Image (tube, rainbow, N blue to C red):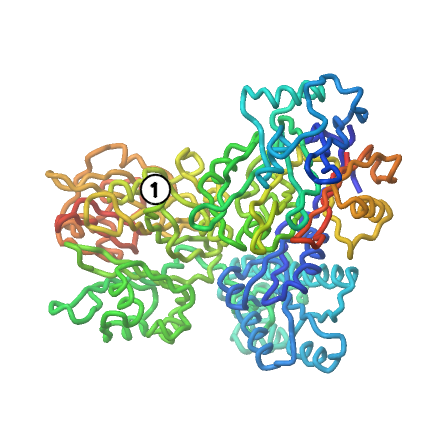
Amino acid sequence: MPVFRVPANPDSLTATVHAVALTPHDTIPILDAAESAGFGFRQYADAQGLIDAASPSVVGCVVTSCGTDSLKDQAVLTQVKTHLHSLPLVALLESDSADRAVGLMQQGIYTVIARPFERGKLLTALSMAVAECQATHRTVDHCREASLRMDEATEKEIEVLQLIMQGKKNKEIAGHLGITVRAVEDRRFRLMKKVGVESVAELVALAVSAKYFRQGFSGSHLRSSAARDPRQCVKGIEVWSPAEDGSVLTLRQSCYREAGMFQEASEKLTFHRGEGLPGRVWERRAPVFLRELITTEFVRSSAAGAAGMTTAIGFPVFCNGDVRAVVLILLDGRHQMKAAFEWWRLDPGTANLRLAGGTFINCERLRRLSEFVQLPVGEGIAGIAAEHGRPYVGARFNDDPGAVRGVALAAEGLSSGVALPLTDSGAMTSDVFTMFNSEDTQMFSLLQAWKVNGRGLSLANEYFDGVSSLAAQMAAVTATEVSIAGRAAALGTPIVVDSGSAAQAVSRSVHIPAPSFGIAIPTLVRGRVVAVTVFAN
Amino acid sequence: MILTATDTLIRYVEIWVPDQGASRLNRAACRVVGGPQLAESERRNCGGARSVAAGEGLAGRAWHQKSATILQEDPSELLDRISLECGASLAAVVAIPIFRQHEICGVVVLGLGAGFGGAEIWNRDDRDELAVSVAYYSGLPSFEFITRYTRFPKGAGIPGQVWESGVPRLLRNVNGSDGFMRSFGNDPAGISEVIGLPIGSSHGFADSVLLLLSSQQTPLAGHMELLNDSLSNTDWQKSLTQHVASGQAPVLCCNSEVSLPHGAEFAVALPMYRNADPVGTLCFLF
């Protein structure tokens, strides 16, 4: 029997129409047009809902209704344009509001559609808006590629290029740099050959594209995360502990990447219960996630901005039922990285774990799924950590028949992860903190779980770049007290490491390069350390 | 437009419509996909009733329970009997009751073969979330696994959206798309289209939601459309919706009655209502 199929347009597969604050009356025709065009469709109660849900790399367009309240409309438009630069905005208007339409276009709206809607016009507007978004992404990709090509240039070649871009002639450049004209020509020729262009005009165009990319498209309608070393995305790790009198949290340990001002600001601070991110973790006795640090909830927000930090995750470490320490991981979420930090909590009704909170960086689909998925206790890394009240390190989740989200994690490229029980009961725990690393951009390339027994520490399992290492198969590997795992075990408190002490953390894993940045976190039961988890790179 | 041919997951269709007093359902049409339309007198087995009361047989059960019904027990006498009657090898049978306000408009019975695809009935649990209560999956083990642990509140996911809106949905190209969160596009037998149908209604929301899952390898039908009165713009679509509107009941129309596109031999159309208002017509072409 005949069956007919129209092959999908590959571009349309990931494009989504995001409807913000639409009435049911407006929703049906927009939904119909989106589906007819082969686009996905999502709706949100307000702009914040869209911003929370969508990543900057999302492809599609935003449809919103604009009424007579221009200030309210302006607030929505500004919010969307600030956070989701590449998504064109389509405004729905009453037919008699021509002035309003002009005003909106001047504010940067991509197009307007007047009620009552005509199906053909709706389809055209949505398709054109999506095409605009796809073009924007192509431009970003082009600039990223230009930036990578320009990485090949030497400092001397860049000197010449910068002067070319200022419009200077070869002779002027030679005079400025104190070299011969021939040397200027040589440098320019070598650079053109290296980056694969045949004319000075092409060279300048490439340099402009690369510059845009490296500056994050500031001043342009295109803004994107720059292609930096993904391992540099962890900008800082802090350990805050209650002062002896239990009145405030103070910064006990920290390591940062090029964050002098932030470090300075942090060292002076203390937090009461409920104050700032550390104080909130202390008060709630649970993880707190701040996807954006430009908020009053983050006291050090300006210093964080200067240090390139955009996202922070805080979680508690318990001892005898009290919060012994609050660990903060500070990230630059603008990187082309993928990562997930989650808080899973036992649902007494079903005896399964459900998502209680989290931050998902560039893995939006995993976030959406996780909100509606339950994890059985005893299965997957979170379930195992919950069942035994012990940390668990895992990888290659697609091969784990018990991992409910195995397919989803693999599809997002999240290949290794850690689950920490948020308890010191030693029995089944109701709360688990998880962190997942991406296959291509390892946030922490080294993940270790150490067991503490009568003889000291033994490595339970270890993953390096998502691959189980031989060291873990060697069974007992005794750590010395000077290693970070050993120190965390001895002191019963998280130990943040710099390049000196981190190397000792993996002294027996000779095949693994010495890490320079990381933390060892103890798990305590009735005041005694039973396990230590290390994540580092 | 490039057209390719393959087998459909739906192998058999029955249409049941109420009698004048809506006290019984009568079998109005039945057809094996790829075979001729069977007159009642031509049916091979007389065991199958031509008329059922609420609670009788599969169609009567769906009507009585006000819920879609999936039959896939192995062995199942009823499934075996339907397979024998229609002469097609069926792995599952889905009965879809259609209500307008609280009146039964008809029941559509779909016989499903093996391949890649499935049908899910989502019902409210004690936390007012939707969970799959009964499902038939063919060739989708990882999808089946994740679904077992998935719950959707009102408005979330396709089941939750259909539940909340009371409006049927047909989503295309869902494999790996944002619109269908349980599919991650890495399943070789990926689901390509999803149909969400609200079944019954009370207090403004659907009682349950039926999801039909279609794959590229074995799509549910040769062609699927969700027709809307305000948007129908081709002759066959208008003609089919008129057929449905005149009887306010599901219909099976042959190419001789409605000039169908793509060389289709017959069409099955299911009118959908939210309370008393029509909210679309689901159409399968074979």
The amino acid type, in three-letter code, at marker 1 is Ile
Circle count: 1
Q: Position of residue B218 (x, y in %)?
A: 67, 32
Q: Position of residue B126 (x, y in %)?
A: 43, 47
Q: Position of residue A150 (x, y in %)?
A: 55, 61
Displayed quadrant of residue A244: bottom left
In the image, B78 versus B110, the foreground residue is: B78
Q: Which residue is mark 1?
A: A381
Classify B23 as above or below A520.
above
Pointer 1 chain: A
Q: Position of residue B151 (x, y in %)?
A: 47, 46
| Residue located 71% across and 60% down the image | A29
Classify B95 as above or below B39.
below
Decide if residue A384 is in sight here: yes
Decide if residue B172 is in sight here: no
In the image, B260 versus A127, the foreground residue is: B260
